[in-house]
Amino acid sequence: MPSVRLSGGNMNAVRREGDTVTRQAGPWTPTVHRYLRYLERAGVTWAPKPLGVEGDRERLTFLDADVPVYPLPEWVWADHVLDEGARMLRELHDASVGFGLEGAVWQSATRVPAEVICHDDFSPHNLGFRDGHLVGAIDFDMCSPGPRLWDIAYFATRVVPLTDDPPVGAPTMGDAPARVSRILRAYGSDATYDDVLRVAIIRLWDLAELSRDKARELGKPELNGHADMYEREARYLAARRP
């Protein structure tokens, strides 16, 4: 069966083989696979299903959908994407309640309060769409326990977007309070716009540190440019808080 390298993936080389994909595995992979099986038993139908580990590669089911890459297409900014993403994130978080943490190994840090298992990278480049509507999520290898707001804030950072330099066709920061409020309503959260900004800033600083670590570990100096961007956006959002 031919193997085809898929686009995207700054941190992992993903290849498609028929109706499956393979990715570089790590010490966290058995925990992530156990978690994905738990989600399936909890009724989540749109997450990848783990098929095993073969040497240093993991195998999962392939999501047959459009996964946008940067620069993001303009349809990503539609209001219904905010609603659908927030509801999917709520379903994911609720389904994770009760997952056993004994012996768990995570690639990302565990954060307090550890309310749920966070996806930790829930944003358009890890979401699958058909006809502009959300049908699934991929790339769970960074997941780890943390607060619900950790995922909500990062999703808002990317789809609102919370930035001083929005892409062509994207809403601006003038639209941000209303768009963040829409996400919070669809999720069912009582957090505030300022709560989201506060955690988004922390999340961006965390991403900057991760990018610099991965630049050294993977020999990808271009990730330092990503870190510079995250730090700039964190400072910008901090200046907008009261």
Image (cartoon, grey):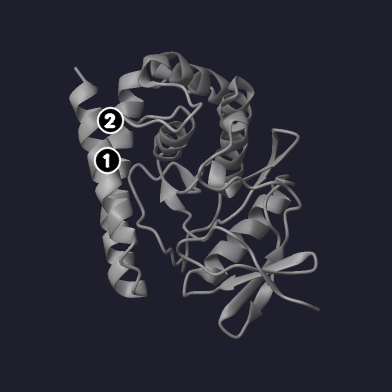
Residue 218 visible in the shown view? yes
The location of residue 26, given as percent across then percent down, is: 48, 74
Neighbor class of circle 2 (other Cα within 10 Å; few <14, some 14-19, many 20+) is some
Locate the N terminus by quadrant: bottom right
Q: Considering the numbered disc 1 on the image, is that residue within a helix, a strand or a loop?
A: helix
Q: Which residue in the rendered view is the most extreme toward the bottom?
A: 55
Identify the residue at horizontal 47%, vertical 58% (top origin). Answer: 142
Identify the residue at horizontal 27%, vertical 40% (top origin). Answer: 202
Image marks 1 and 2: residues in contact by CB distance under 8 Å = yes
Q: Considering the numbered disc 2 on the image, is that residue within a helix, a strand or a loop?
A: helix
Q: Nearer the viewer, residue 226 or 55?
A: 226
Which kind of residue does numbered mark 1 sit on? Ile
Identify the residue at horizontal 54%, vertical 58% (top origin). Answer: 8
Q: Nearer the viewer, residue 176 or 44?
A: 176
Tell me where residue 107 sits by quadrant: bottom left
Identify the residue at horizontal 34%, vertical 32% (top origin). Answer: 165
Neighbor class of circle 1 (other Cα within 10 Å; few <14, some 14-19, many 20+) is some
Q: Is residue 200 above or below residue 57?
A: above
The location of residue 17, given as percent across then percent down, is: 75, 71
Indicate which disc residue 240 carries: none
The residue that disc 1 covers is: 202
Q: Is residue 128 above or below residue 32?
A: above
The location of residue 46, given as percent across then percent down, is: 71, 46
Q: Is residue 35 left or right of residue 172?
A: right
Q: Is residue 57 left or right of residue 105?
A: right
The residue that disc 2 covers is: 198
Residue 97 visible in the shown view? no
